[in-house]
Image (cartoon, rainbow, N blue to C red):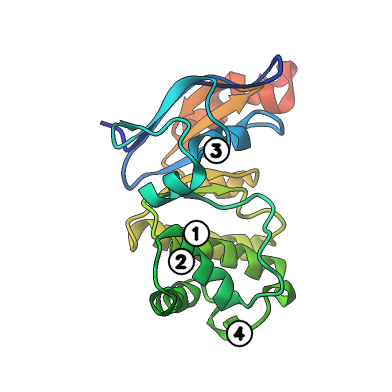
Amino acid sequence: MAFLEAKKVSKFFGALAAVSEIDFTLEKGEILGMIGPNGSGKTTLFNVIVGVYPPDRGKILFSGKDISGKKPHKICHLGITKTSQIVQPFTSMTVLENVMIGGMFGKGLTLSKAKEKAKEFIDFVGLFKYLDEPSGKITVASRRRLELARALATEPEIILLDENMAGLTPWEIDEVLELLRKVNKDMGITLFVVEHVMRAVMGISERIIVLNYGEKIAEGSPEEVAKDPAVIEAYLGEKYA
C-alpha cells in the first residue's frame, strides 16, 4: 500500500482540465519529484492533495484512507503539509512567532510547547540568530528556510515543497538541498518536490513524474525522465525530441 496515492485525479476550472486523470504513488520515506512547464498543473495537483481544491474526479489516498475533499486543516492534522510557491510570512511578527503558529494551529500545541518546538525547528533550518527578528526584515533565502520551519512545526509525515528554491543563488540552492536531505533522512519525513531548478530536482529525487497540459506524460528515475522523448518535446519542442 502506497503512503500517498492519486487515482485518476482530475480538476476542472470551467471547461479547462487543470489536471486530468493523474495517477501517482509516493512511498514512505521517499523523495518524489514533479516537473513540467509552467501551467502544466503541478501546483493545482498539490492544492488538490492538501484540500485547497476538491478533486472533480478520482481520489487521493493517504495510508489507504480516502482524504479527497477534506478541508486543509484536517489534512494538515493528518500529517500532510505544503510550503508555498510565494513565501508570505506574517511580516510584522518575529521568526519565532511565525513558526509557533504552525505548532499551535497545525498540531494544537499549547503556547509554551509551541514556543519550545519552534525554537528547535528554527535552529534546525539555521535561523536561530534571527529568532526575534521581524520576518519582514530577513532575506529571501532566509524566508525560504522560515517557510520550511513553519511546515516542520506542524510535525508532518509528508511535506509538499512547491518551488522552494525559487529566487536562490546556486550556493543557496546547495544549502537547501542539504537541508532537505536531513529532513528526509534524519527526521524521516517523506518529501514531494515541485521544482523548476532542474539540477536541484534531478539531484535530490529518487523518482520523478512529469506533467504537461495537466496530464502525466512520463515517470521514472531522473536519468530515465531526462532522456524521455515526450519530456524533451514538452520543454524544447518536437524537433528536439
Kind of residue sitting beneath label 4:
Asp
- Mark sitting earlier along the chain (3/4): 3
**Badge 4 vs badge 1, beta-carbon distance below 8 Å:** no
Q: Nearer the viewer, residue 144 or 58?
A: 58
| Mark 3 residue element | helix
> Mark 2 packing: few (<14 Cα in 10 Å), some, or many (20+)?
some
Amino acid type of the residue that numbered disc 3 sits on in the rendered structure: Phe
Q: Quadrant of residue 26?
A: top left
Point out the tag, 1 or 3, that comes first from the N-terminus: 3
Q: Is residue 159 in view?
A: no
Judged from this view, the residue extending furthest toward the left is 1
Kind of residue at disc 2: Met
x and y percent of residue 185 in the render?
Answer: 34, 58
Mark 4 — residue?
132
Q: Callout 4 environment at 10 Å: few (<14), some (14 to 19), or many (20+)?
A: few
State how far apart marks 3 and 4 are (Cα). Answer: 32 Å
Of residues 109 and 89, the one nearer the viewer is 109
Residue depicted at 60% across the width and 75% down the height: 95
Q: Which residue is mark 2?
A: 104
Q: Secondary structure at mark 4?
A: loop
Residue drawn where x is 40% and y is 34% of the image: 67
Q: Are marks 2 and 1 in contact (CB under 8 Å)?
A: no
Q: Are marks 2 and 3 in contact (CB under 8 Å)?
A: no
Q: State the residue position of label 1.
A: 151
